[in-house]
Image (spheres, rainbow, N blue to C red):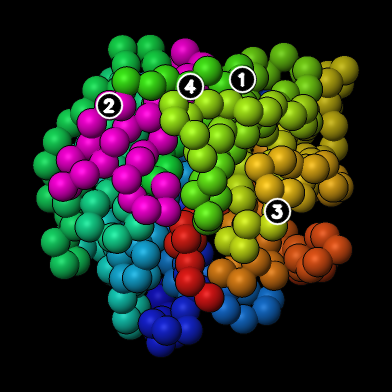
Amino acid sequence: MTTAAAPAGKRQIALSAVDGKLVLDKGAIKVINHGERDGAMLYDLSVFPPREVGYLAMPTSLAGPPQSAAVSPDQTLALVTAAQKTDPANPARTIPDTRVTVIDIASGPARITQTLEAGLGPTGVSFSPDGRMAVVANRNDGTLSVFRVEGQALVKTATVPVGDRQCQPASTAFTPDGATLLVSRDGDHFVSVFDVADGQVRAAGRDISAGIKPYGLSVAPNGQFAVTANVGRVSGDADSISVIDLTRKPYRVMDTLGVAATPEAVLISPDGAWVVAVCHNGSTRVEDSPFFNPNGTLVVFRVSGLQLVRHAEHPIGRWAQGAAFSHDSTALLVQNTVERELQVFRVGSQGFTDTGERLPIAFGSFAAIRTVDFPST
C-alpha cells in the first residue's frame, strides 16, 4: 500500500517498523521465515484517529529498542535499522545484520532511496535536531555509525567506539541543541555522553551509571533532563526508569523510580508534561508462569520541574514495543505486538484515556515506532 503524503506543513508522520520473521510462541521468540515480510508502516497523526498512509517492504528487526527507526526534523527522510536477519545456514535462528534503509517521505508515495551499511547489529538511530546528521548504535560491535545528510542521501563519515563488544549500545538520543548525544548501553549498565560539533561525534569521557540494563532513552524538549528505561534482568521483578539531570555537568542520574517489569520503552511528551514507560509486565511469559500477566502496563508520570510524579497506570497489550505521541501531545499510540494493533490514547490535562480505537496490522511483530523527536507545533 502507498498513499500520497499530506502537505509538509500539516503532516505528523509516525514510522512503525514491523518484523515479519519473528513471533512470540509460548513465551519464546520463534523465527518463521527469511524476512520477506519485514516492512514499515507510515501513519498520519494530524488526524484523529490516526490513519495509515503507507507501507514499504524493507529489512528490520525487533532485536533492539523501539527507537530503531527515525524521522528527520523536516519530515522528508526516515530511517529503519535491521539488527538481525534470518541465518541462511539455519532458518530457525537469526544472525546480526548491518543494513539501514533510507526512505524519502518528502511528498507523494514514500519510497526507498538507499540501503546503507552500518556496523554489526544496528539498532537505535536518531537524526540530529538540525537534520544534518544521523547516528546509529551498532549493538554487536560496540560502536556508533555516523552519517552526514546530503539532501535526500546519507553518507557515512565515521565509526565511533562506545565501549567493548559487550557494552551493547542500544538507543541514541540528541539534546535539543544538538551539542550532546546520549547512548544507552544495556550490556554494561551505562549511558555514555558524546560531544557533537562540526559534524563530528566525540566521547565526552562521561559514562553515567543508570539502572540495570538501560535500554530505551528519551530527552525532554527543554533539554533539562533525559529518562532511560532500565529493562532489568527479565526475572519477574519490578524494574525502573532513571532521570538524568542535564542542567549540570557532569550529567548525572538524579532519581530512579520503580515501574512494572521490563520497561522496554520510555517517552517524554513533546510538550514536556508527561513521561510514559511501556512495560511488558510479564505479558511475554507462558500463561502458567507465576510471573505471567495478561496485559502490559503503561506507567504514566507527570513532570514537575526535574521531578517525575507517578500519575497513573493503564493496561496495554502483550509484548508492547514502543509508543509515539502526536506533535501536540494530545494522542499517544502504543504498539501491542501479540494483538498486532496500535492502541490509541487521548491525552489531556488530567491524564490519559484509552479511546478504544485500535489500528490493526495484518502480520508480523512490532519492532519500533518514531516521530520527529522535537516537533514544533
Check disc 4 and give the amino acid type: Ile
Q: Which mark is residue 203?
A: 2
Provide the secondary structure element on which disc 1 rests. loop
Q: Secondary structure at mark 2?
A: strand
First-in-chain label (4 vs 2): 2
Task: Check disc 3 and report its element: helix, strand or loop.
Answer: strand
Above or below, 207 against 373 in this view is above
Any mark on residue 208, and which?
4
Q: Distance of mark 4 from mark 2, alpha carbons?
A: 12 Å
Alpha carbons under labels 1 and 4: distance apart: 10 Å
Q: Nearer the viewer, residue 193 or 48?
A: 193
Q: Where are the magenta residues, as a range?
A: 175-204
| Disc 1 packing (10 Å; few <14; some 14–19; many ≥20) | many
Please rate how many residues cluster around mark 4, counting C-alpha atoms within 10 Å: few if below 14, some from 14 to 19, many from 20: many
Depth check, mark 1 against mark 4: the one in front is 4
Across and down, in percent, residue 354 comes to: 82, 62
Towards the viewer: 360 or 131: 131
Q: Which mark is residue 106?
A: none
Q: Looking at the image, do the residues carrying marks 1 and 3 touch, with CB atoms under 8 Å apart?
A: no
Mark 1 or mark 3, which has the lower sequence index?
Answer: 1
Residue that appears at 16% across and 67% down: 151
User: Which three-letter amino acid code belongs to the residue tagged 3?
Assistant: Trp
Q: Nearer the viewer, residue 126 or 377?
A: 377
Query: Magenta stretch: residue 193 in it?
Result: yes
**Cα–Cα span, label 3 and label 2:** 30 Å
